[in-house]
Amino acid sequence: MGYQAFTVQDAIERVRTLGLIGNEPVTAEEIGDGNLNLVFRIHAGDQHLILKQALPYAKVVGESWPLSLERAWIEQSALKEFAKVAIPFVPRVYHASKEEAFTVMEDLSHLTIVRAGLLEGEKYPLLAEHIGSYLARTLFYTSDFALGPVAKKQIARQYYNPDLCDITEKLIFTDPFYDAETNAIEAGLEAEVDRVWNDAELKREVAKLEALFITKGDALLHGDLHTGSIFASADETKVIDPEFAFYGPFGFDVGQFIAHLFFAAYPKYDQLREERIKDIDTFWLTFASTFKALWEREAVEPFRSADGLVEDVLSTILQDALGFAGCELIRRTIGLAPVADLEQIADPTVRLERKRHALRLGAALIKRRTECKTFTDLRNFDVTEELSR
Amino acid sequence: MGYQAFTVQDAIERVRTLGLIGNEPVTAEEIGDGNLNLVFRIHAGDQHLILKQALPYAKVVGESWPLSLERAWIEQSALKEFAKVAIPFVPRVYHASKEEAFTVMEDLSHLTIVRAGLLEGEKYPLLAEHIGSYLARTLFYTSDFALGPVAKKQIARQYYNPDLCDITEKLIFTDPFYDAETNAIEAGLEAEVDRVWNDAELKREVAKLEALFITKGDALLHGDLHTGSIFASADETKVIDPEFAFYGPFGFDVGQFIAHLFFAAYPKYDQLREERIKDIDTFWLTFASTFKALWEREAVEPFRSADGLVEDVLSTILQDALGFAGCELIRRTIGLAPVADLEQIADPTVRLERKRHALRLGAALIKRRTECKTFTDLRNFDVTEELSR
């Protein structure tokens, strides 16, 4: 049974054959954007399912390039791995097929995608805390600190994900820092972008972050943890789409989430800035305290007994995360895959000002990340004043 | 054809079947120490060969534990990989069998093992330069900087070597830092060893170096680069035995070699110290200048264009290397597998003094490694004075 892209009818037949629905009437539709995956929503009786199938190519802005189907298997495996240690925050998986590159999981339609929700003024009072807990658990439990190096190596070798890592390397660490075709630079932003391209220190620090991304295998990362990969409500949070999962540096997921909380403030900056900064505070404090508690309870020797090590590990995670957040801020402002948080600002003057702000903030985070010994140091990173001069 | 440990007769038959020798009279003997491998030296006519076969266990101090035969395949592959980029410094391989876990290579009997040679007063005027060049080439060419991340990931995944990495993790980073059974602590050294065990800062820094060893996949390392893994003469240098090869941090091989140059001074410290420090100088300068030249000529974009990046990479390699050198100094002084450089010092007072020196130097290198921005800073690391107080 080889791979073939499903029609709606194929999707229904699969879940029926699997016994996930009976013979009751079914409604089903394809709801994906068709760029990387097919996504079918299937309702039958009380059963609400999502069937997601990988496509053998990626389509971005009309361009199409081939992409390994293996990422479906990576996503399935990562969902299961994350569910083991952070079950409240991971969608339930009912079936996974490697051969046909599809996964059947719970339908999360009762929740909203966080980016869209925040843009519409929705509140997610537990989001920051939930993601802090989710990341502390997924990162700690898949690391050497919990597994020991031998078991961890056995797991890590299953998560080579060269295709999707390559996309990240190009789109986050490379293309935004020179005049690449993939960039999408709004007219009026050229002078600010030139500042980025001519900043030798910035480019060196980005190259160091890229090298870290490529070579450090601390833990199993989600790999694409922006607010579009999170479903939530006032009391529930689910992280979806870990197809970019791989063994990478602790700080990467942490940094991406921080970057997108910054983005979430831009539509109404004066009003939302404090709220989002508080979210970042809560997120980091939850992450750090949970990680530390897990460490103290469960880290394998000899790590646990090394005095002051976990504090040092957390301080390194923070610094790396701020650097990665800076890269994400820059790439989502001028690179491929811009964010609605900026693009939907109607007033062009305001929009350009916020984009300049994002670029400045990104550069500051990248270049000054090692100044942050504790999270409160981040409050000194406001570049608003610098921009108004 | 499954695996079976060879007799001398089996070894002769294999090389004959392979056409590596003809029907001329053969002399052959097993010359290994039988702890991890069988090593047969086979002479027939003009042909001088070594056949090395992995044993399915490791024997150390009477203890025996099972060990995967896959390491023979790792060693064969690493020898071929290193030969591609550093051919003058790698023994020629004539045949490699994964199934029977053996490799046939050139006999290097015209050279001497460097540790033994140095102990007998032999000079290797080109050793430091050769190993500097060897490591610059093997580390650079197997890294992301030369291969790019996609190709590198494909190679790296072949070098998972959990068994042997586990040995290193235990014997270098863990056991010497607490009262482990594997340690071999000479009577009279207890007070100095207690200093090590009670030094919380030292133990934290060792744990950080261990985490680096476990998680950072910069380049294909030799993994066990001490002076017993090097054959040399006045003008030739060959690095053997890369069965510990894996993708690890740049600084590890560099640090191990530095540690063993330090050890080589201990038999006649007053007389040899300057000479060995000069070797370390030469080694590092050759390594750094070769690495930098390769980078400038051959690093893939975007790394090459990042201003000041290679200097930063080299400075990180140096600091990590000094930390790893410190760990190696400590473990070879009080852990399993002590070095002849110390053990063969006949006068017990002198021997204990040198061992104390090695422990102090090791701890200083580990704790103060980040003070070294350039290699000349290392000259300030003389702990002799501290010990005489």
Image (spheres, coloured by chain):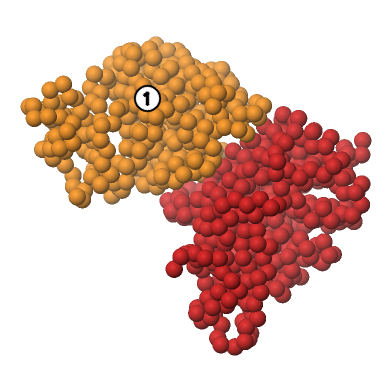
Chain colours: A orange, B red
Q: Nearer the viewer, residue A302 or A365?
A: A302
- Residue for point 13% across, 40% down: A10
Q: Amino acid at mark 1?
A: Ile
At horizontal 50% and vertical 21% (from top left) the residue drawn is: A290
Q: Is residue A143 above or below residue B97?
A: above
Q: Quarter holding the C terminus of chain B?
A: top right
Q: Horizontal and vertical percent for residue B6?
A: 56, 69
Residue of label 1: A87
Closest to the observer: A237 or B43?
Answer: B43
Q: Which residue lies at the image location 68% right of the left edge and 35% below the top edge?
A: B205
Q: Looking at this rendering, what residue extends furthest in the bottom direction? A: B24
Q: Quadrant of residue B323?
A: top right
Above or below: residue A179 compared with residue B240: above
Which residue lies at the image location 84% right of the left edge and 64% below the top edge?
Answer: B121
Above or below — where is B349 with respect to B193? below
Residue B234 position within the rendered picture, expressed as x and y whole percent measured from the top left? 76, 70
Residue B377 position in % (x across, y down): 77, 43
The quadrant the N terminus of chain B occupies is bottom left
Q: Is residue A222 left or right of residue B108?
A: left
Q: Seen in the image, is A309 located left or right of residue A33? A: right
Asked whether, in this view, residue A35 is left or right of residue B252, the answer is: left
Mark 1 surroundings within 10 Å by alpha-carbon count, few (fewer than 14), some (14 through 19), many (20 or more): some
Residue A118, image quadrant: top left
Observer able to see residue A358: no
* Chain of residue at mark 1: A
Residue sitting nearer the eye, B167 or B64: B64
Instruction: Find numbered disc 1 in the image and state the secondary structure of the residue it sits on.
Output: helix
Looking at the picture, how far across and down is residue A14, in whole percent?
16, 38
Residue situated in front as seen by the camera: B281 or B210: B210
